[in-house]
Amino acid sequence: MKGSAMGRGGRTATGLAAALCALSAASAAAQCTPPANSNEAKLLAFYEAPIVFATADAPMRLPLGGLALTGELVGVPAPAANTQRTNFCYPATQDATHLSPLLPRVRLTVGLPFGFAIEGSYLPPVTVDRAQPNLGSLALSYTRSLIAPPANVSGVAVLLQLRAHATMGSVKGPITCPTSALQLTDEGAPCFGSAPSKDTFYPTSEGGEGSLGVTAPGGRVTVFAGGGYTFLSPHFRVGFTNENDVTDRTLVEIDLQRAAVFGGVDVRIFRALDAGAEVYSVPADLTTWRVTARYRLW
């Protein structure tokens, strides 16, 4: 891969997954479907994981018409060096594929009848560093109380939440051949040209998960844990035109499934505001973290 790689936030949380395929050889438009054990597929899955619209904080039951706004920051670790070496769609090349260590996101949750809620997020096409995200996510959740203390009595409370989620969109940026990788000395080598590539990563996922939240007496601290399963179908489009005016438009596509586990803690700052931290792990790909601040508007 050519490029430093987010992702549906030097380094930009959105250039993320796009960094994957060293898509550097300037072949004409082509299509590649690498197997699940290829480095190309592993990189796509690796960078999609932080973008998945997974549970970010403790279960919460909103009243009908209730609104909550959550600010989220997700860590984006760098993949192992050996994973960044292409081995299927292109001749083996090694590149730094990590454009951003962070992915910021804002979520809006609206309470529906009978314990249901709808949750949405949109990351607009504002260029950050060298990447331009345009990502949308949506989730539907159901929350019910399993244990609740009597009215006006301080005690342990337990909430169960079931949730379905989906994410789609694009991230554009010079991923395969950024300015730093361009060269005009060897026509047969990668990135032979004077203009950086215009590549596009399309993260696409849908899945489901469940979580339990246990609130300590007094209602100030909640610990939560859960797990889920996600179907990934991301694809990546190369966009590099070399010095001979030949454009590489190779499309790389995969279909994978991933299990995830997560756990964390939320602390109420005051009645309408809580802050949280979570560890989120996709055992096949990565372990990362999320920090959140959730404000209940009403």
Image (cartoon, rainbow, N blue to C red):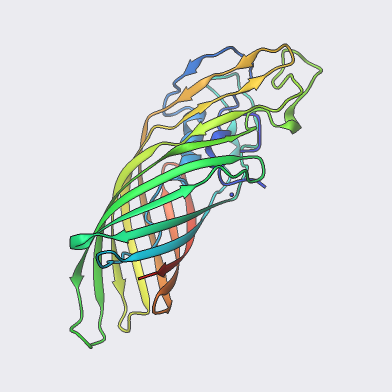
Identify the image quadrant of residue 178. top right
User: In the figure, is residue 182 to the left or right of 66?
Assistant: right
Image location of residue 277, percent across then percent down: 46, 65
In this picture, is 237 found above or below 108?
above
Image location of residue 273, percent across then percent down: 43, 73
Furthest residue to the bottom? 152
Identify the image quadrant of residue 240. top right
Residue drawn at (51%, 30%) of the image: 39
Image location of residue 13, percent across then percent down: 57, 47
Name the quadrant of the C terminus. bottom left
In this picture, is 106 found above or below 235?
below
User: In the figure, is residue 98 to the left or right of 33?
Assistant: right
Q: Along the line of sight, which residue is nearer the eye, 97 or 36? A: 97
Q: Along the line of sight, which residue is nearer the eye, 228 or 269? A: 269
Image location of residue 195, percent across then percent down: 73, 25
Answer yes or no: is residue 15 visible: no
Q: Along the line of sight, which residue is nearer the eye, 37 or 62? A: 62
Name the quadrant of the N terminus. top right
Residue drawn at (38%, 76%) of the image: 221
In this picture, is 279 found above or below 265?
above
Residue drawn at (60%, 23%) of the image: 239
Residue drawn at (61%, 41%) of the image: 98
User: In the figure, is residue 174 to the left or right of 74?
Assistant: right
